[in-house]
């Protein structure tokens, strides 16, 4: 690799890092913003329920992704270094299909088990995703 290619690579890395940093910063500002709005206008009880729901959702996301994002990074860089672009395309297509199927299954399981998770595990009737689908009322759990 000559000096010119090295300089271009460093410039590309610097530009990409700045874009990622700005996106990350914007994401964090929006996250803190909506959390402040929830806490201030809906109270600590609703914010606590929101935080519990996010924890349960993030657990399902962690298990449904199977760590494929890290695997994609590893194998794409490996195959790119070897110049095997057809394998990179195959990895993307396979990972995308696996993620779509596992996400749909995970979302369906979360929807079906929402009542069980909220009442039996977290002991909170207010966490049920769709209360209109159940024939149970608040007095059933008091």
Image (cartoon, rainbow, N blue to C red):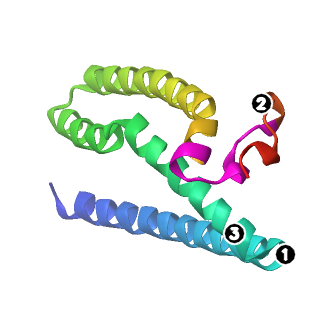
Q: Distance between the residues labelled 2 and 3?
A: 24 Å
Q: Is residue 64 visible?
A: yes
Q: Name the residue under label 2.
A: 134
Mark 3 nearby-residue class (10 Å; few <14, some 14–19, many ≥20): some
Quarter where residue 93 is shown: top left
Q: Distance between the residues labelled 1 and 3?
A: 10 Å
Q: How far apart are marks 2 and 1 (CA)?
A: 28 Å
Question: Residue 117's spot in the image, x, y percent?
Answer: 55, 42
Quarter where residue 113 is shown: top right
Residue 87 part of the magenta segment:
no
Residue 124 part of the magenta segment:
yes
Mark 1 nearby-residue class (10 Å; few <14, some 14–19, many ≥20): few
Mark 2 nearby-residue class (10 Å; few <14, some 14–19, many ≥20): few
Q: Mark 1 points at which residue?
A: 41
Sequence-first disc among 2 and 3: 3
Residue sitting at 22 percent across and 25 percent down?
84
Q: Is residue 40 above or below residue 80?
A: below
Q: Name the residue under label 3.
A: 47
Q: In this view, does 22 lie to the left or right of 76?
A: right
Q: Give the magenta range.
A: 119-131
Of 85 and 75, which appears nearest the observer? 75
The residue mark sitting in front, 2 or 3, is 2
Give the secondary structure at mark 3.
Answer: helix
Give the secondary structure at mark 2.
Answer: loop
């Amino acid at each position: 690799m000559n000096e010119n290619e090295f300089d271009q690579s460093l410039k590309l890395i610097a530009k990409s890092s700045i874009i990622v940093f700005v996106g990350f910063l914007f994401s964090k500002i929006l996250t803190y913003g909506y959390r402040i709005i929830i806490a201030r206008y809906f109270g600590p009880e609703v914010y606590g329920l929101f935080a519990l729901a996010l924890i349960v959702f993030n657990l399902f996301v962690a298990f449904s992704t199977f760590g494929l994002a890290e695997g994609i990074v590893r194998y794409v860089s490996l195959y790119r270094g070897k110049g095997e672009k057809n394998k990179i395309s195959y990895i993307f297509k396979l990972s995308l299909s696996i993620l779509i199927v596992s996400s749909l299954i995970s979302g369906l399981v979360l929807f079906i088990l929402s009542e069980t998770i909220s009442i039996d595990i977290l002991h909170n009737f207010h966490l049920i995703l769709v209360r209109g689908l159940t024939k149970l009322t608040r007095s059933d759990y008091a």
